[in-house]
Image: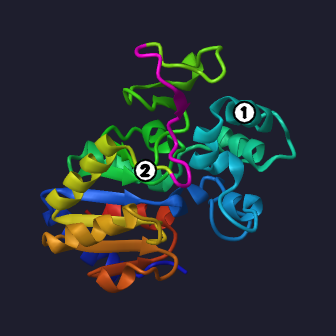
Amino acid sequence: MTQTTQPIQQAAAIVARAHRLTALVGAGLSASSGIPTYRGPGGLWTRQRPRQGAPPLLSYQEFVRDPAAWWQARLAAETDPSHPIYQMKQAVDQAAPNPGHLALAQLEQRGILHCIITQNVDNLHAAAGSRAVLEIHGNRNRLRCLQCHRRTPRNTQTPQNPPQCQQCNGLLKLDTVMFGEPIPPDVLQACRQAAEQSDCMLLVGTSGTVNPAARLPLLAKENGATLIEINPEATPLTPWCDLSLTGPADAILPQLLNSI
């Protein structure tokens, strides 16, 4: 169903008046690029989840218990066509930014959008041209040292198992935040600060169920921000929103951009 013009125009007027516009982006935006979500029908979490706990290759507890065994299993999964990890990797490798990603990049380039807080790890915002991006769940293309928190491209991974940081010899893991892993404090603080300083926040394709990201709109609201939700269906955050635009983000965001 095509979004009616009146709510789009209302949203455009609010966005145009904003001094510090932030976008909180979830998996719903990247789903339009062909990337499966973690949750929901066919999601990676759904297919891998055992009866209790997180899937071993998505579990931070399993990683810290035996990093060498985890890395060995992870690299094997990435080359096994029958494994969901391989299938997700293939989907992300082949994905390209969709019109929603491109619209957000244009909003930034016009000086309207201050920053993006993304829950996605697929690097599609950068591929679309966005520069002011806070990746609260990390980036699949990077490694992160658990000791000094230095981030490096994954293609620089050392041959040791487990890989070690070339700066401090600390343990390296994927930058993506695993189930049971705390959000890196530097990123979390930056996201909270962005939310507190926002006077308008776009909630784009996020389920509103994964904390601490789901609390950021409430933090923005407490500080006087206007919340505009863009989602095909209602979420737990919908009652807090000042305006809801119902539909896929890759369709609505270009309409919003063109209405400003």
- The magenta span reads 167-180
Report the coloring of the rendering: rainbow
Quadrant where the image shows the C terminus: bottom left
Residue at the image point whose x is 28% and y is 52% from the top: 191
Asked whether the viewer can see residue 13, the reply is no
Name which quarter of the figure residue 109 lies in. top left
Looking at numbered disc 1 in the image, what kind of residue is underneath it? Ala
Q: Quadrant of the N terminus?
A: bottom right
**At 21% across and 73% down in the image, what residue appears?**
221
178 lies above or below 163? below
Mark number, residue 69: 1
User: Where's residue 214, x and y in %?
Assistant: 38, 67
Location of residue 197 in the rendering, given as x and y in whole percent from the top left corner: 15, 57
Q: Label 1 neighbourhood size at 10 Å, few (<14), some (14-19), many (20+)?
A: some
Secondary element at image label 1 = helix
Name of the residue lying farthest toward the front: 65
Residue assigned mark 2: 182
